[in-house]
Each structure stands twice: as structure tokens, then as C-alpha cells.
Amino acid sequence: MIMRQLSLFPDIDEEVVTKPVNVASIPQRSPFRYPGGKTWFVPTFRNWLASRCSKPKILIEPFAGGGIISLTALFENLVNNAVMVELDDDIAAVWKSVVGGYTKWLADRILEFDLTRDSVIHELSQASFDIKEKAFQTILKNRTFHGGILAEGAGLLKYGENGKGIRSRWYPATLARRFSDLSLIADRICFRQEDGLDVIQEYSRRKDVVYFIDPPYTAGGKKAGKRLYRHCDLDHDHLFSLCKTINGDFLMTYDNADEVKAMARRHGFQMRLIPMNNTHHATIEELVIGNDLSWMDCYPAVHEPKTEYKANNNKLNVPA
């Protein structure tokens, strides 16, 4: 059955997850080096769409960030159009510039910029009300700050990789090419700087829409969320309730937290744990949530979270 469904999309990667994905093997579409980015999830996302009986018209990504999932879906023609939603002003400036026709301007600006510590400090000290200039400053910060973090308190790289310091993540030719490539799909992106939950609700009655939902941290990881993102407050239970009402299909990824698994069970969703490598190169498991995840059961490294009941009081015990 899986092979028959995969044939609906001949260009889809049929990789079966047996171990954490090597992100170097995935086409890098996004100009961002984004904390919590989902490049590693691309093969699983492809196979999710392949398991469906028809090609979705629209992909909604309500917490877009670096946008790798939406960009992959568009470049590989897995969907017709994508609605990318992001609240952060800096990140929004980049996507607004892309859909506004400034990809060539950004590519040229990146190529001509002479990056030194002093030039970065000078550039970022300039207040900019021009959307494309703000977009350039955002990319500059993303590529020269520790971990690509844009939240308040982030600072410039000191040592970087192999002693390259502030230039260790600055690849002007590569970044320029990514912006140039984005011009090829920009007219298929609808970018909205809004509350992602509102956008989910707006499209909830459409059956030809799918959602990839990668929310901010839950309460248990809120400290980390505030360190990484400006907007990390979210009513997670409301998000789950919204997902219960939509007519289209959705796929959600979360940190592997007991409170999340409890919410998923309460709303009747299926769950699987999938391996990934974190920023410290340690293998951890990420939680995948959806209406029907049976298509993942052919992956040897994927499994359901275990549920156990204590015999003495029937209290639900949810191990990792």
C-alpha cells in the first residue's frame, strides 16, 4: 500500500527513517540558520504527503520561522501554494522582502557586504525603517550571532567554527544563491505576520488544506523558548482544540514532554516518537502528532510513546 501511494508523487524521497537524518543530505532552501529548524524532518514530511490520496492545494505553516518545510513543499511541487505565518518583526521582514520582489536586492547586498566585526556592529547600529534593509540586518544577525538566535540578549560570535570567528557562518555566495532561488517560488507564497492560531481557524473548513505545525516550547521548556524566540507564549491546549476542528489534515511536531502527550491523548490524536540529532549532536526523540500516523509504522526507528497504568490506583503514568 505504501509503495502504491508513494507513486502518486514520483519526485518524493522514499527514504525510510532508520536513524537520525543527516541534514547535509537535505537541500538547504532557507536563508536562515534557525534554532529549532526542521531540516531534519523533511524526509518524514515528504512521506506524510505521499501517504495521502491527493495533492493538497495549500500548506499552512502557522509558526514558520525559517520556513524550511514550506519552501521544500513549494520547490518540490508537493503543494500548489503555501501560507507562511510568523509574528517576529525581524523574520517577517525577510519573508515580506521575498514576496515583495526584493530577492535580487538582498542577494546583491549580501555579496557586496565586507563582513568584519566592526562592519557588522556598524550596520546593526543603524535604525532601519526600510523593509529590505531590515531583512538584510536580520540575515546578518542570524549568521553572526551565537546559534543564529535573534531574541534579545543574543550576541556576536567570538570564536565560531575552526577559529573563523564571526565569519564562520557567513557564506555570501550560498546565501545570495538561496535568495535568487526564492524568486522562483515567491509568487506561490502568501506571507502573513499574524497569530498562527487565527490563520488555522480561518482555513479550518477547507478540505484541500494541510497544516505543518511546529509550535514554540510548552510551559516546561518556556525558559529555553524565551532565550531562543521573541514570541514563545502560546495557549497549547487551544491549539490542540483547533486541530480537532479542522477539515484538512495536519502534522504537528513537539518536544517530547509529558504535558504534550497528555494533551494529545485528551484530544484523541495519534503520536509517534522519531529520532533526531540536537545542536549538541546527541540523539533525542521528537514527538510527532496527527490524526492518522499509521504511515510511519514502517520506520524501524519510530515508535509510539508507551502508556502504563499503575495497578494500585489506575493512575495514568506516561514514561518518555
Image (spheres, rainbow, N blue to C red):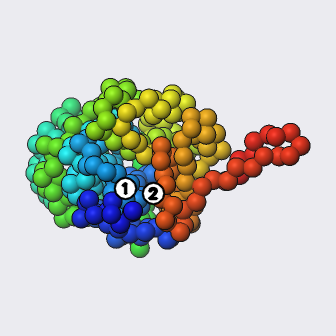
Instruction: Describe residue 227's horizontal placement relative to residue 205 as left or right.
Output: right
Residue 51: mark: 1
Q: Nearer the viewer, residue 124 or 64?
A: 64
Which x, y percent locates residue 97? 18, 41
Q: Which mark is residue 295?
A: 2
The residue sitting at 49% across, 55% down in the picture is 294
Q: Quadrant of the N terminus?
A: bottom left
Of 129 and 277, nearer the camera is 277
Compared across the picture, whether 183 is left or right of 152 comes to: left
Which residue sits at x=65%, y=44%? 258
**Residue neighbourhood size for the residue with mark 2, other residues' Cα within 10 Å, grouped as few (<14), some (14–19), many (≥20):** some
- Viewer-nearest residue: 137 or 36: 36
**Mark 2–mark 1 contact, CB under 8 Å?**
yes
- Residue 99, located in which quarter of the rendered image? top left
| Residue most extreme to the bottom | 162
Q: Position of residue 48 (x, y in %)?
A: 38, 54
